[in-house]
Amino acid sequence: MGSLHVEATTDPVVAIERARGYLASHPVELNLIWSIMRQRADSGAPGRYWLLELDGYTAGIVLESPPGHSVAISPLRGDLAAGMARAISIEGHRLSGVAGEASAAAAFAGRWTEEVGTAAVVEDAQRLYVLSDLVQPEGVPGRLRRAEISERGLVSEWWSAFEVETGLPRVDVSGVVDSGLSTGRLFIWDDGGARCLARATEPVGRISRIGAVFTPPSWRRREYAAACVGALCAWVRGEEGANSILYAQLGNPGSNAIYRRLGFQAVSEVLAYRFGEVAKHR
């Protein structure tokens, strides 16, 4: 292994510039990290970014934003992920958890427990998919349209319900909903009224991330989610010249089956660990 160096910065613009080549060479696997860095650069929201430099080139990223949120780690060899955990612990910064490609997240979490003297518990497992050949579902009534400002209350209610169902921490969703509505990134499957919600992030590296896919229980088992996601992916390709990725919880076989039928192919598994309190009297 060559010369390894970890550098921290709170400036997302600096982080993006230094990691530009690395981000561009892995647009699918690094889409989430890249998107968050772009959003923080635009909004000025706080965050912290650790760049792993190997032989003078960026080879890994750990991102914490907002402060106190679990960090996201890029796919890395186990020894490099462990090295980043050690470097961050030596810095004295304390983390609440880590999420990323399964082997990298596991190596980071394992080393973190050794360095800090804490526990690590898996709290979520997902699969990252990338769209290959899109197969649109047939015979589903309705159409795709952008969510309207007048639907803010409904969208907020559905987004909150989505977070509850997927086990995400309960937070105020008004900011993300307002941003999605104002930028036209929130979409509705309409069949005589709103039936399903989905979001497509602004493409980075010609990749858009589909998320927040939610159909109220009373409208499920009618293929609305499949039709909504399929039409949204077609829109991303046709209007923006980009491809789509998405994350699906491994504990939900229904959603995984839907996405595979649409033409999504698995890229990797993703694990999220939550760190416990630091042990006393170490």
Image (cartoon, rainbow, N blue to C red):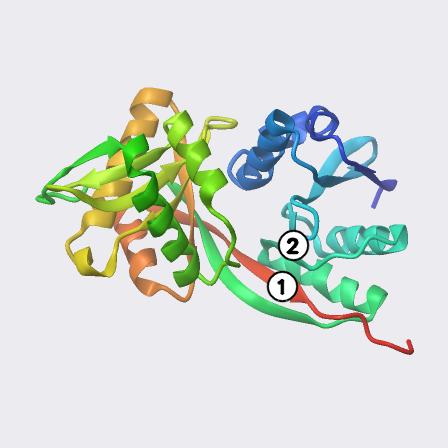
- Mark 2: give few (<14), some (14-19) or many (20+) Cα within 10 Å: some
Kindly check if marks 1 and 2 are in contact, taking CB atoms under 8 A apart as contact: yes
Query: As drawn, is 20 to the left or to the right of 222?
Result: right
Image coordinates for residue 71, horizontal then vertical, percent? 67, 51
Q: Earlier in the sequence, mark 1 or mark 2?
A: 2
Q: Residues within 10 Å of mark 1 (few under 14, many from 20)?
A: many
SS at badge 2: loop
For image coordinates 77% across by 55% down, the residue present is 79
Q: Is residue 134 visible?
A: no
What is the number of the mark on residue 273?
1
Is 48 rendered above or below residue 236? below
Please state which of residues 118 and 181 is positioned toward the viewer in this rendering: 181
Q: Residue at x 11, y 45 (%)?
A: 140
**Quadrant housing the C terminus:** bottom right
**In the foreground, 188 or 236:** 188
- C-alpha distance separating marks 1 and 2: 8 Å
Q: Position of residue 2 (x, y in %)?
A: 85, 41
Could you tell whether 66 is left or right of 221 in the image? Answer: right
Tell me the residue at 36%/64% (across/down): 252
Residue receiving disc 2: 70
Q: Position of residue 170 (x, y in %)?
A: 50, 58
One can see residue 215 in this view: yes
Q: Amino acid at mark 2?
A: Ser
SS class, disc 1: strand
Image quarter of residue 121: bottom right
Residue shown at 70%/30% (left/top)? 12
